[in-house]
Amino acid sequence: MSTMMCAKCARPFTSGSILSALDKKWHPECFVCTICKRTLADQSFHVKNDDPFCANCWKENFQPRCATCSKIIDPSEQYMTYNDRAYHKNCFTCAACHQSLAGKQFCIKDNGYYCPEHKLKYKNFKIILHFK
């Protein structure tokens, strides 16, 4: 019969608690956040590439940030993406009048987004899109 070993430190389990997570066995003190190294025993955690992360490190490192205001976009918030950039719905606005473009047609000029009304006032727009 083989001795069970901790997935992190590779030491055997002699006595005390054994924590099961990610289809592996761990000493409770060995199951830690990949970034901050705080224990994850008795905490919820996130996983990326089989590495565990505490909620704070996950939020700071992996949750999208709004391309306009740079704030983290909470998973409960509605947001949109365009050109691989995330935006709060209220932050995706016309560069001229600051009206929300969420779910509306918009135009692009010089890396700015414009509502259809302002498209008429300017020339040489690259494209017109409908953004949901």
Image: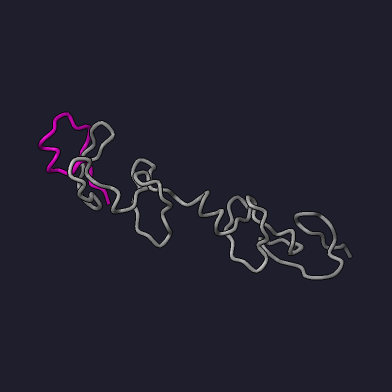
Of all residues, the one furthest to the top in this rendering is 124
In this picture, which residue range is highlighted in magenta?
114-132
Residue at (64% x, 52% y) in the render: 36
Q: Vertical placement of 107 versus 123: above or below?
A: below
Q: Quadrant of residue 45?
A: bottom right
Q: Vertical placement of 113 versus 80: above or below?
A: above
Q: Residue 60 at what x, y percent from top left?
A: 51, 51
Q: Residue 131: within the magenta? A: yes
Point out the image quarter for the N terminus.
bottom right
Residue at (26% x, 48% y) in the render: 131
Q: Which colour scheme is used?
A: one colour
Q: Vertical placement of 10 versus 14: above or below?
A: above
User: Does residue 95 appear left or right of residue 28 in this picture?
Assistant: left
Residue at (56% x, 53% y) in the render: 57
Q: In which quarter of the image is residue 54?
A: bottom right
User: Does residue 12 appear left or right of residue 48 in this picture?
Assistant: right
Q: In which quarter of the image is residue 94?
A: top left
Q: Residue 9 at what x, y percent from top left?
A: 79, 54
Of all residues, the one furthest to the right in this rendering is 1
Q: Residue 28 at what x, y percent from top left?
A: 73, 64
Residue at (66% x, 57% y) in the render: 38
Q: Residue 47 at what x, y percent from top left?
A: 59, 56
Q: Residue 15: within the magenta? A: no
Q: Nearer the viewer, residue 111 or 51?
A: 111
Count the marks: how many?
0
Of all residues, the one furthest to the left in this rendering is 120
